[in-house]
Image (cartoon, helix red, strand yellow):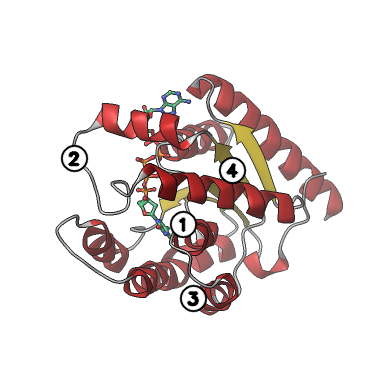
């Protein structure tokens, strides 16, 4: 058994997909939602920043390569997007008993703004707790791939950069190392998957992890 359900998430289950830029999160989250939806579950697929109308506006701002902003200004924008996501999407979906997949959530703030930008981790944890009203993921899939491979994937897809993706390689390496530290600290919640392999291999592993977790959770209740 990987983790117990977090009672804060109500009747549904809350699963996040995390990792560095280009790790394959969006590809995996869509495939997982498709597979589990076809198996008859009520599935919600959402993402940060941008799962709400306000979040989409904030995403445009925070990723705009023409816009200069301080590291804490950047952090507040991600937190504001998260707060609206929790209120408008996550809590209602979980209360309705849905299986919710979020492409990024609070671990991204610790990895990018904490380990990547060097902001105080304890303060970020407190702010995350406030923005989420204490809503924690039940299970997190961490797609682990080197910054070099991840950035090569995003750059092969599009030559248009964004304010965070365009940061230097050292920044993205710190982010990835930060995600690995978080996974080592919270083995009961965060499960790492080797995301340097094909998308289908990553999906196979993820489906096994999620189905085992759902079975164990069902057995516990
Ligand atoms: N951010 C976000 C913070 O700094 N703090 C925060 O609190 C939050 C929430 C936007 C940025 O914001 C930062 C992190 C980001 O820099 P985002 O939109 O999730 O967040 O940004 P990206 O991670 O850059 O999203 P991408 O869509 O670019 O990457 P994904 O989702 O990891 O990768 P995906 O699935 O889109 O795949 C990228 C390409 O690789 C291919 C896909 O087909 C696609 O072309 N691919 C694979 N190729 C080979 N093998 C595989 N296994 C593959 N999987 C996918």
Chain-order first, disc 1 or disc 3: 1
Q: Nearer the viewer, mark 2 or mark 3?
A: 2
Locate residue 33, reporting x and y percent. 50, 39
178 with respect to 139 (left or right) = left
Question: Do the residues bearing badges 2 and 3 touch, measured as CB atoms within 8 Å?
Answer: no
| Residue at 28% over, 26% down | 156
Instruction: Determine whether the residue tagged by mark 4 lies in a helix, strand or loop.
Output: strand
Q: How many other residues sit within 10 Å of disc 1, few (<14), some (14-19) or many (≥20)?
A: many
Above or below 150: residue 57: below
Point out residue 97 in the picture as x, y percentages from the top left corner.
60, 58
Identify residue for label 4: 142
Which residue lies under the disc numbered 3? 131
- Observer-side mark, 2 or 1, equals 1
> Within the image, what quadrant is residue 201 found in?
top right
Q: Find the distance from the CA under tag 4 to the CA under tag 1.
A: 17 Å
Say whether disc 2 or disc 1 marks the residue closer to the N-terminus. Answer: 1
Q: Nearer the viewer, residue 211 or 92?
A: 211
What residue appears at the point 47 percent right and 68 percent down from the top-left corner? 86
Q: Secondary structure at mark 2?
A: loop
Residue under pointer 2: 160
- Give the mark, 2 or 3, whose residue is nearer the N terminus: 3
Residue that label 1 marks: 116
- Quarter of the picture containing the C terminus is bottom right
């Amino acid at each position: 058994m990987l983790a117990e359900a977090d009672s804060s998430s109500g009747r549904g289950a809350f699963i996040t997909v995390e990792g560095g830029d280009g790790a394959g999160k969006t590809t995996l989250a869509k495939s997982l939602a498709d597979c589990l939806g076809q198996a008859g579950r009520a599935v919600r697929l959402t993402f940060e920043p941008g799962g709400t109308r306000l979040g989409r506006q904030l995403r445009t701002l925070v990723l705009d390569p023409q816009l200069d902003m301080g590291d804490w200004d950047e952090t507040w924008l991600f937190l504001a997007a998260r707060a609206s996501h929790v209120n408008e999407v996550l809590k209602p979906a979980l209360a309705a008993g849905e299986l919710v997949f979020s492409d990024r959530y609070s671990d991204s703030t610790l990895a990018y703004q904490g380990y990547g930008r060097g902001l105080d981790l304890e303060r970020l944890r407190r702010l995350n707790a406030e923005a989420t009203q204490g809503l924690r993921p039940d299970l997190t899939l961490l797609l682990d791939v080197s910054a070099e491979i991840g950035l090569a994937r995003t750059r092969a897809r599009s030559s248009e950069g964004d304010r965070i993706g365009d940061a230097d390689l050292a920044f993205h390496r710190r982010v990835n190392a930060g995600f690995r530290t978080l996974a080592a600290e919270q083995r009961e919640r965060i499960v790492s998957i080797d995301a340097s392999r094909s998308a289908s291999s990553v999906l196979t592993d993820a489906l096994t992890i999620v189905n085992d977790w759902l079975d164990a959770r069902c057995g516990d209740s």
